[in-house]
Amino acid sequence: MQDQWSEVDKNQHGIPRVSGGTADKSEQARVKEQKQIEQYQRLEADVILRIKSKDYSNDTFQATSQLLSQNPEYYTIWNHRRRLLQDVFAKERDRKEDADAADTEAAEREGLTSPQREISLLVKEDLHFLVPLLRQYPKCYWIWNHRSWLLGTATRLLPSHTATELWQGELGLVSKMLSLDSRNFHGWGYRREVVKEIERMSTSSMVEKEFSYTTKMVQSNLSNFSAWHYRSQLIPHLLAERQADCDARKNFLDGEFELITKALYTDPYDQSLWFYHHYLMSTLDPTNSQAPAILDPCTDAERSYYYEQELENVRDMLDGAEDCKYIYQSLLELSQQLRQLDAGNQAVIKGELTAWLSQLLKIDSLRQGRWRDLELKLKL
Amino acid sequence: MSLAAGPGRGGGGGAQGQLPDEMKVVVEKHVAYIQSLDTRREELEYHLTEHLRISGIYWGLTALHLLGHPDALPRDGVLDFLFSCLHADGGFGAAPGHDPHMLYTVSSVQILAMVDGFDELEKRMKDGKLKVAKYIAGLQQPNGTFAGDEWGETDTRFLYCALNALSLLGFLPSQQADQPPLIDVPAATAYVKACQNFDGGFGTEPGAESHSGQVFTCCGALSITGELDSYLGEEGKDRLGAWLSERQLPSGGLNGRPEKLVDVCYSWWVMSSMAMIGRLHWIDKAKLTAFILQCQDPEEGGFADRPGDMVDVFHTVFGLAGLSLLGHPGLVEVDPA
């Protein structure tokens, strides 16, 4: 079993091959590398010794920071860092409300006890430490995990107003990360987690806001597969929350078709857009249990109506894009659905199906086997 | 990933002779490359990747099996290292002193299966197999999925890992019918199904977009529990097969998600999934073969993510497994699940 999917590992990807490998390294480079190794091993040995002797001091904490900055993939060190923090948090919680009047006063202003304030400061400091690391290694699972653990710990140990505030801050961070790489699946996963937590703590839904966020994302870059995906996931919740009736649902579906049709006219070669178009069509397909219906009720007459409408729309897209395979795929898909629903429908004639399929066989040579199978299935 | 090697199943044995040079797998060089991996201690990279060591050995060993040189790494040395990573709770870390984790536990179990080392495990730890199985089972969550370790990260990767390792150990509930089940299989498969999207693919968790790696883990999980065919049906296989076949780009290589770069390792994740659902003929095998071979370093051995990049053991095993699945001559045949 692999450790990371390919796109994830900074160490193993996209590094140009140099001939000869290590043999060609200059003496100077070799000496430098030996020094780096010694320095790294010293630091590692120091951290491990400190943890073994349960030295949960600030110095140890800083040493783990140093080591993790050099090697954020070293998961055991992240575990040690959490053990250290757990120890510090436990000590804070056992500590008597203290002594220092200024501390107590500062804590009270934030609605916290002074140990709680201390914990919140430590959590914030650690969140802060992670930001440059995330920017440098946006695909490192362990950094995202540690962030998620810090927030979860804050939820357990701090009053809800403080924890909520921390989670709210994460929305800003994750939006920033997604603006840097709109396809980072760690970022999208983290966003779902953040939204779920904020919703849970505030007992109010963020569906409308998140839906608007996806609108903003696809408007700034139409070719954002992940944003279209997220949008498709939000729709059932959005409609339920709006208590959308039959007409409202139909209007909604029409609006989405309009949005995607416009986008497809701009770039019919973009797979992300076809993905969303395909999704909208799937909501009309009762056999696809992963795409809940948008229309309610969704009658056969309405299905036919949309299939015919989209057949016409997509046919029009061929004009000037005769070499675009996605158009033929969509036409074939739509015709099959229409024929399943209404075998006698004349919106598509057999000759057209044959013509579309032979176009695909011609322009999509990589997938000949798939189109041959379809040819058999359609009995052409 | 289990390996089914044996006489009569080989992908063509030594029939590389007639192939043009650029189509030949440089078997001896790959073997030498893998053997050299543990001697690179003068490289910083060797030290920075210690957190992957056990998986690295698994990748290397699997590659050697595919190359027909299963004994090229010393069995005793491998076992000694492996047991130095074993914790009292039955979990394995990536290297001595590293914490136990699902990923390294499954790599260890896979290595033990490959070198026929389960007896050795029993010798070194009382009821060792059961202990390891219990470590894995203990990571199952109430919703059916599995965590990677005590810190609780969940991902369908870990779910597949758990089923894979338990099946190799012989501790799946179906393999231990007279014992109380160690894990809740129906909950696990229900979770996998909740990760499926309308496009037929699967994500890391419910709501996450489809990703080829996750397609492999989810199909693999359902395949191990024997539900893949009945769950997907022909319609579902067509849908998933369509999504997977779109992963092939004009270079011949495969990507992991729409509009991402091609990468040799997806030769395995995508192709094995296609093989599991009987749709492998939906991509151009000749072009993919040529792409994988372009990622081979013909001088020093090993495969890279893309042509011209640095090689590593991860891409080496998945490049070779891909070629094996494509039936390329000179390699041992591999089982997609």
Image (spheres, coloured by chain):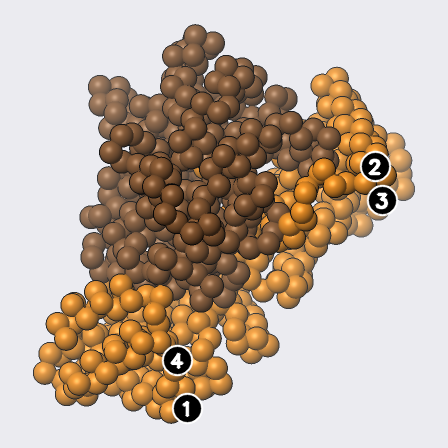
Chain colours: A orange, B brown
How far apart are labels 3 and 2 at the CA level?
A: 61 Å
Select label 4 or label 3 by which is in front.
Answer: 4
- Identified at 77% across, 32% down, the residue is A37
- Identified at 38% across, 19% down, the residue is B116
Mark before the other along the chain sequence, 1 or 3:
3
Residue placed under numbered mark 3 in the picture? A105
Give me the chain letter of mark 3.
A
How far apart are labels 4 and 2 at the CA level?
A: 55 Å
Residue placed under numbered mark 4 in the picture? A324
Give me the chain letter of mark 1.
A
Neighbours of disc 2 within 10 Å: few (<14), some (14-19), many (20+): few
Q: Which amino acid type corresponds to the residue marked 1 in the rendered image? A: Gly
Select label 3 or label 2 by which is in front.
Answer: 2
Give me the chain letter of mark 4.
A
Select label 1 or label 3 by which is in front.
Answer: 1
Mark before the other along the chain sequence, 4 or 2:
2
Q: Are marks 4 and 2 on the same chain?
A: yes
- Identified at 66% across, 64% down, the residue is A180
Coordinates of residue A147 in the picture (x, y in percent): 64, 45
How far apart are labels 1 and 4 at the CA level?
A: 9 Å
Q: Residue B84 versus residue B78: which sits nearer the camera?
A: B78
Give me the chain letter of mark 2.
A
